[in-house]
Amino acid sequence: MRIADVQDGDTVPVVRFEGVSMRYGRGPETLSDLRFTLHPGSFHFLTGPSGAGKSSLLKLIYLAHRASRGRVELFGRDISLTRPEDLPFVRRRIGVVFQDFRLLDHLPVFDNAALPLRIAGRKPASYRDDVAELLQWVGLGERMHALPATLSGGEKQRLAIARAVVDRPDVLLADEPTGNVDPAMSLRLLRLFVELNRLGTTVLIATHDEDLVARANRPTLHLENGRLVDVADTSPEPDYDRGYDDEDDAEDEA
Ligand SMILES: Nc1ncnc2c1ncn2[C@@H]1O[C@H](COP(=O)(O)OP(=O)(O)OP(=O)(O)O)[C@@H](O)[C@H]1O
């Protein structure tokens, strides 16, 4: 699949970049003339060498940074015309896994994972079982009462993922979500992202994990020096379960 392969449809795109550039301060352009569209329910990887601008692109979508040129649309709205007081509502529709996790150190694992639900005003009784099940799935079932400071890097990463997906956001942005986990857990997390996508979430994952990209067989946005370039589609058929079966699940969850 090539980046120009944008499906036509009547639905409003979730993300649309038209000639978007950005720079940090007065520095050179970090991203230049980006044009792409993410349609509802799509699943893309974002690849490219270190420093190519992957995290910066995610920051633009998450509204943590403004474009210096061009037009960024989220959910059909031109972000430059959106009132500042409305931006938190836009952001709430986006689940993010940051490279540095951004966990709340004073809250135990369970409360960190459940935070988006609490912010949305849900009562704990309505989500307790769902959050526990999700934490079980990401291998943190035994660590629900632990504080983040006592978790390994991989555990923190899995907690950050659980928090990002728990409220089934309209969009999931994940920056190197499998950077700290072993290959079996990486596949498990891929299955979580695929399932979330099946339920309707638009997914964009920045990664260096070539195995993950090959297994998922989803279209790729590829950055080089801050510009999107076409990549040839050489992926095999989707194969989420290779080397991984339900018995493994049962063992992990036992
Ligand atoms: N806060 C910042 N201030 C100034 N320059 C920055 C800032 N953040 C990133 N950059 C620069 O922007 C460029 C793109 O960085 P970015 O983190 O987006 O790349 P990346 O593709 O995500 O890299 P990696 O794969 O290593 O995470 C790099 O040259 C980086 O040094």
Image (cartoon, rainbow, N blue to C red):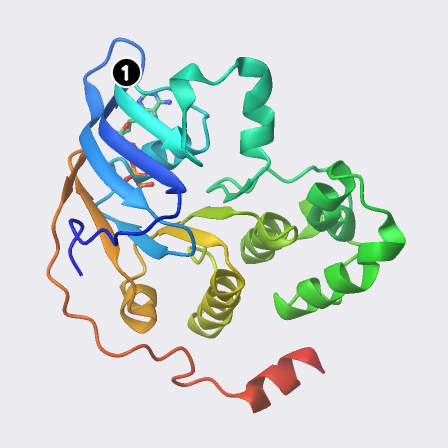
Q: Residue furthest front?
A: 10
Q: Is residue 176 left or right of residue 149?
A: left
Q: Is residue 115 visible?
A: yes
Q: Is residue 161 left or right of residue 227?
A: right
- Give the quadrant of the N terminus: bottom left
Q: Amino acid at mark 1?
A: Ser
The x, y position of residue 232, in whole percent, is 10, 61
The x, y position of residue 154, in whole percent, is 54, 57
Question: Residue 12 or 201: which is nearer the viewer?
Answer: 12
Instruction: Please determine whether, in this image, residue 222 is positioned above or below residue 239.
Output: above
Instruction: Please determine whether, in this image, residue 245 is positioned above or below residue 117.
Output: below
The x, y position of residue 207, in whole percent, is 33, 53
Residue 224 sits in which quadrant? top left
- Give the quadrant of the C terminus: bottom right
Circle count: 1
Q: Is residue 91 left or right of residue 45?
A: right
The x, y position of residue 24, in whole percent, is 31, 17
The residue under the point 61% across, 65% down is 138
The residue under the point 47% across, 75% down is 184
The residue under the point 42% across, 55% down is 179
Question: Residue 43 or 133: which is nearer the viewer?
Answer: 43
Near mark 1 (Cα within 10 A), the count class, few <14, some 14-19 or many ≥20, is some
Q: Which residue is mark 1?
A: 68
Ligand 1's image quarter is: top left
Question: Residue 76 or 198: which is nearer the viewer?
Answer: 76
